[in-house]
Image (cartoon, rainbow, N blue to C red):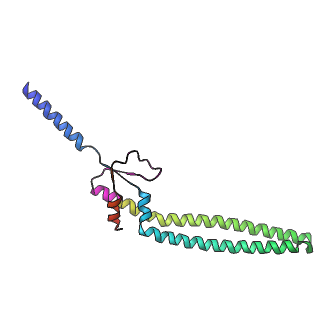
Amino acid sequence: MKTFKKLTAVFLLLLVTVSVTAQSKIAHIDSQSLISEMPEVKEAQAQLEKLQKTYATEIDASMKEYQTKLQTYSADAQNQTDVTNQARQKELAGMEQNIQQYQQTASQDIQKKQADLLKPLIEKARAAIQKVARGLGYDYVIDGTQGGSLILSDGKDLIEDVRKELRF
């Protein structure tokens, strides 16, 4: 009977030890904050701003040309025939439509460029997070970014360790 109690006690002790060591280690990180602090982001933002300024300059020039023609045609409308005025209205409508299409195209190009510039940075950050987490023995890393699925943030925040990995 004593042997049975000893075996039961040893079994329970082993069970407790296994369950304690089997618990997963969980950490959290604000990946948006990390990515925004990466030096490469400033370079990407500068490229995007340059592209935006280029499009804005072209759109402004088109708008000025449109406004000039509109004023010229409006001032001269009484001296022209109905056929000429209708042709001018069609021309102005076409210009307005072209400007709107160009604005949409510019917006899409800027969004695509932003995605193209950020994708490698996101992948670099993700790889560094995984490397640091595995090196520190974490099984799960929860992204604590605003709107993320973070429920409890008592775990270790890896941002400082990942900054060291990325050397900034």
Q: Is residue 10 above or below residue 98?
A: above
State left or right for residue 63 relative to residue 134.
Answer: right
State left or right for residue 5 relative to residue 165.
Answer: left
Q: Is residue 128 above or below residue 27?
A: below
Identity of the residue drawn at 91% across and 69% down: 82
Identity of the residue drawn at 34% across and 48% down: 154
Estimate the x, y position of residue 167 in percent, counting from the top left.
34, 68
Quarter of the picture containing the C terminus is bottom left
Q: What stretch of residues is rendered in magenta?
A: 129-152
State left or right for residue 158 relative to residue 147.
Answer: left
In this view, which residue lies farthest toward the front? 154
Residue 136 is a magenta residue:
yes
Quarter of the picture containing the N terminus is top left
Residue 56 is a magenta residue:
no
In this view, which residue lies farthest toward the top? 1
Query: Would you identify the image quadrant in which residue 57 lies?
Result: bottom right
Estimate the x, y position of residue 33 in percent, counting from the top left.
43, 59
Q: Nearer the viewer, residue 75 or 3?
A: 75
> Tag count in the figure?
0
Q: Nearer the viewer, residue 79 or 86?
A: 79
Identity of the residue drawn at 76% across and 72% down: 67
Query: Would you identify the image quadrant in which residue 104 lies?
Result: bottom right
Estimate the x, y position of residue 107 in percent, counting from the top left.
61, 64
Estimate the x, y position of residue 51 in percent, counting from the top left.
57, 72
